[in-house]
Image (cartoon, rainbow, N blue to C red):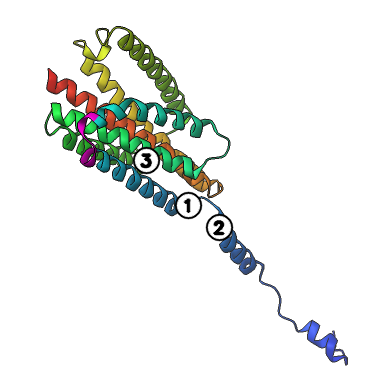
Amino acid sequence: MSNSHNPVFNRVLKAPTVNQEAVDAQFEQITSGNKMTFEGTSVKIAGLFIVLLAAAGATWLLAPLETQVFLLLPSALVGFGLALWLTFSRKISPVGVVAYAAVEGVFLGGLSSLFEQIYPGIVYTAVMATLVTAGGMFAAYYFGLIKVDARFTRIMFASLIGYGLFALVNFGFSMFTGGSMNAYGTEWGWAIALVGVGLAAFTLNLDFEDIKQGVAKGLPAEYEWRAAFGLTVTLIWLYVEILRLLSILRRD
């Protein structure tokens, strides 16, 4: 086609073409800040544990033992209530998640202080065992030694429901009988506690998979709070179960 004598028309013909790939890349860069990422989730997990440890440390170091014991039941009930609300709420509340970490910190601080009074050195062992177990589970998940597929998920959910029902029934009997009918106080208490440790440890794989799938599916960034909350709940549960198991072994 010959060039037009119209200079305006010539400019249109010579205008640079739009690189669609570059436009798409720029759009993705702009919108990616609204999506869930590993980095964002890691920051929120770290923040929650800073709050948790600060509350636990303040309770242990600043509150008298009588106050720590007094706060155990209220903090446990409030933490349980917050956990239920956050789990079943349609939209996660960052303030609620941080509040949960703070309340659980008060609970863990008092509980750890009480156990340390009875069994000196048990808290350090429990913390190290929790870190090693969590690290081992993450390594097994990362290297594909544990596959979180539909079958694994079904087995875990069934096991968690069963253990949860057992824990509620055992708690009820223990409360109404003054602790005389507590399954953990029997000769098989260590085995029951070991099952709890195992369930909590393997539940971590569900949390890892939840984070992985959330990032892969490009879920909204607010989902980072839900994922961080889930992992925090599991790690707290793992620590408590390990603390219980160690206390039973020390008692025997």
**Quick one: label 2 or label 1, which is nearer the N terminus?**
2
What residue is drawn where x is 47% and y is 29%?
84
Q: Which one is in front, 44 or 42?
A: 44
Residue mark closest to the camera, 2 vs 3: 3
Q: CA distance from mark 3 to mark 1?
A: 24 Å
Q: Which residues are magenta?
A: 60-66
Residue 72 picture location, percent across and down = 30, 28
Q: CA distance from mark 2 to mark 1?
A: 9 Å
**Quick one: label 3 or label 1, which is nearer the N terminus?**
1
What residue is drawn where x is 38% and y is 40%?
101
Report the residue marked by disc 2: 32
Residue mark closest to the camera, 3 vs 1: 3
**Quick one: label 2 or label 3, which is nearer the N terminus?**
2
Q: Is residue 101 above or below residue 188?
A: below
Label 2 crowd (10 A; few <14 / some 14-19 / many >=20)? some
Q: Are marks 2 and 1 in contact (CB under 8 Å)?
A: yes
**Quadrant in the picture for the N terminus:** bottom right
Q: CA distance from mark 2 to mark 3?
A: 30 Å
Q: Which one is in front, 94 or 117?
A: 117
Residue 77 picture location, percent across and down = 39, 26
Asked if residue 29 shows in the view, the reply is: yes
Report the residue marked by disc 1: 37
Predominant SS along the magenta part: helix
Instruction: Label 2, secondary structure: give it.
Output: helix
Q: Are marks 2 and 3 in contact (CB under 8 Å)?
A: no
Instruction: Label 1, secondary structure: give it.
Output: loop
